Image: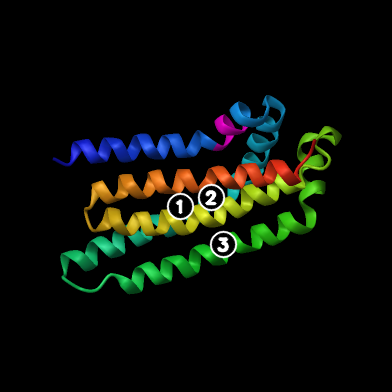
Amino acid sequence: AFAGPSLAARVANSAYNNAATVIAGTIVSPTFASYVKSALTVAQPARLPLRSVIDSVFIQVSGNVERDEPVVTPVQQGIDVAGMFALPLVAGAAVLGDEVMMTAFGSGYGGTGVVLLAATSGLVFESYGKTLIASLHGTDQPGRVALANGAQAVVFVPALLVARLFGPP
């Protein structure tokens, strides 16, 4: 009974991880997809501490469920810590986005700071979403995990379109 929803959750998660680049290339252009992929690459190191937060929430929630204790405190603490790691990245992208993209990838990436801003904003959304999804994993609800992963991927698409509207030509 667990394998079906668990497999669906993994497929949805994989689709989510690659959705930004695929959708950008399909809907907008391959050039815009390269901007998105590059911005996601720049933001990648910020995912490392967030992974620890997500794993910690899963462990704490699972333990609380096992002990029949409330799960609200570890989830709230996970959300708070995830924000502490993710929000400064957005501020940095807002102030230095163009410079960071041109330093990392060359002058051809001038004007792509807004794509980095969208990617880092997506990372904040992702960090909150993944923290909440980890709490569902900890309560052993794979069907809800699959739904949450799918919903998170669907919400990310409009963010890409906004980045394209305000991004490079």
| Image spot of residue 120 (x, y percent) | 63, 52
Image position of 139 (left or right of 133)? left
Question: How many circles with numbers are drawn on the protein?
Answer: 3
Q: Mark 3 and mark 2: span between their CA atoms?
A: 9 Å
Amino acid type, residue under disc 3 in the picture: Phe
Q: Assign the C terminus to one quadrant of the image.
A: top right
Q: Looking at the image, is 115 positioned above or below residue 11?
A: below
Write the start and end of the magenta stretch as one range.
20-24
For the residues bearing labels 2 and 1, Cβ distance under 8 angstroms = yes
Mark 2 Cα within 10 Å, few/some/many (few <14, many 20+)?
some
Mark 3 Cα within 10 Å, few/some/many (few <14, many 20+)?
some
Q: Nearer the viewer, residue 137 or 50?
A: 137
Q: Mark 3 and mark 1: span between their CA atoms?
A: 11 Å
Identity of the residue drawn at 66% across and 43% down: 42
In magenta segment, residue 66: no
Which labelled disc corresponds to residue 51? 1
Amino acid type, residue under disc 1 in the picture: Arg
Q: For numbered disc 3, what is the local secondary structure?
A: helix
Amino acid type, residue under disc 2 in the picture: Arg
User: Residue under circle 3?
Assistant: 85
In magenta segment, residue 23: yes
Residue 115 in which image quadrant:
top right
Which labelled disc corresponds to residue 18? none
Q: Nearer the viewer, residue 42 or 123?
A: 123
Which labelled disc corresponds to residue 47? 2
| Render colour scheme | rainbow
